[in-house]
Image (cartoon, rainbow, N blue to C red):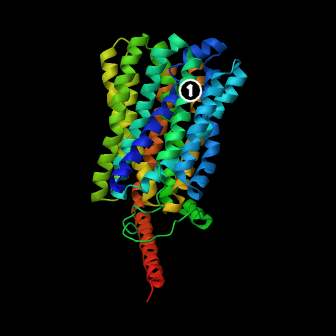
Amino acid sequence: MRPSRYRWFVLAMMFCFVVLHQADKLLISPLTTPIMEEFGINEAQMGLIFSGAVIVGAVFYPLWGYLYDRFARAKLLALASFIWGTTTALSASMRTFPSFLATRASTGIDDSSYPGLYSLLADYFPPEMRGRVNGLLEVAMPIGYLLGMILALLLGGAIGWRNVFYITGSVGILLAIAIFVGVREPKRGSSEPELRDLSQMRDYRFDWRVARRLVRNRTVLLLIGNGFFGVFPWQVITFWFFRYLETERGYASNQVLFTMVLAVLILASGYPAGGAIGDLLFRRTVRGRMIVSAAGVILGAIFLAITLRIPSGSTLLFGAMLCLTAFFIPFAAPNVSSTLYDVTLPEVRSTAHALLSFFEQLGSSTAPALAGFIAVRFSLGEAILYICTSTWLICFIFLALTAHFVPRDIAALRERLRERAELERLREAATKPS
């Protein structure tokens, strides 16, 4: 298979991993009601189950980031898939609330394995394509949620929620074998414009000196600030919106399915649309990706506020506004990850992504539980509204500041890569026989 075609095969494999992993990870949301009924727990206790996996995932992000920059990313992704399969099956076998809480938290170990996936693809695709590639990859997340929802609704009642988890856990183990056998490891930085024409190139690996510079990079720090608040809405919507439709808007199962399928499909289209628009503006100005990101979060906040204030009887209007909201809220995701790689050296990109994701999870780890406590006191609708809109407004400020600083940080990285390319050419010339 030619390299230019093989990279699309790798993207397809990573797409499958994300779809199936997200289906397993998010399957618990549509199965919330039967799980709560079996264990006899309330929203606050269920929120602890949601938050447990998020907290464990946050703790493991730095470790995954270091390992990906130090060792072969493809093999580590296969390991992550195997861990996904085994921890899911283990949690499904638990019969008491404390044991289920503990084992469900262990499923967060593999949830923090994504930085290596993005870093791997960044070495197959050049900077000018990364917005679109990341956007296509992130389509897999809502598709995975949709697949999990369909599995829950179609199989949950027929075979029980435990058996559904056994099925998705088995898929994780099979996919681990496929990734281990089928995905090759590229050299770090091989797709950068300054480096990709070199006939020979060092295989750059994790360097503590380079990693320490990440905390002095203005763009990286601002993206971390954005991430700290930016995942709050996603955690709340992911884990609680299904139950909100059931209990507070009075939707029957078929209405929930139709509404969520439509909203998730529109949401899925927002990822590649945001990534493509970001790439287009990036060619005009290096601030382009941040402009698209800032526009997405502010429009998402406005439209969600309008949507949740629509009366329960106005089903058609609610559905239309929900879809409009869903289209804009993923605009930032592919552009943030692409911008992170626009300002970091190849050998620490997994670490940088893990650092960003660590603070995303650290900030949002309390979001499901916080929403549960607010719901007990007020309502799920109020919890979703206040948490989402307030954090998106904060994100808008961080993204606007990032747009101001990012040109200087991109220029600095390109200069470092040009210097590196010149050193590689000099080294190659020195090793040639005279």
Camera-side residue of 153 and 40:
153
User: Against 153, is 174 above or below?
Assistant: below
Question: For the point 43% across and 83% down, which residue is it?
Answer: 429
Camera-side residue of 127 and 343:
127
Question: For the point 36% across and 58% down, which residue is it?
Answer: 126
Residue tagged 1: 371
User: Against 65, is 234 above or below?
Assistant: above
What x and y, as percent, mark residue 16? 43, 37
Q: Is residue 292 left or right of residue 220?
A: left
User: Against 36, is 433 above or below?
Assistant: below
Question: For the point 45% across and 63% down, which residue is it?
Answer: 189
What x and y, as percent, mark residue 113? 56, 44
Camera-side residue of 76 and 390:
76
Give the residue type that dot 1 points to. Answer: Ala
Question: For the point 41% across and 52% down, which residue is it?
Answer: 338
User: Against 166, is 292 above or below?
Assistant: below
- Is residue 48 in view? no
- Is residue 296 in view? yes
Total marks drawn? 1
The local crowd at label 1, few if under 14, some if 14 to 19, many if 20 or more residues have their Cα within 10 Å, is many
What x and y, as percent, mark residue 80? 58, 41
- Give the secondary structure at mark 1: helix
Q: Is residue 364 left or right of residue 120?
A: right
What is the quadrant of the C terminus in the image?
Answer: bottom left
Report which quarter residue 301 is drawn in.
top left
Q: Residue furthest bottom?
A: 434
What x and y, as percent, mark residue 227? 51, 45
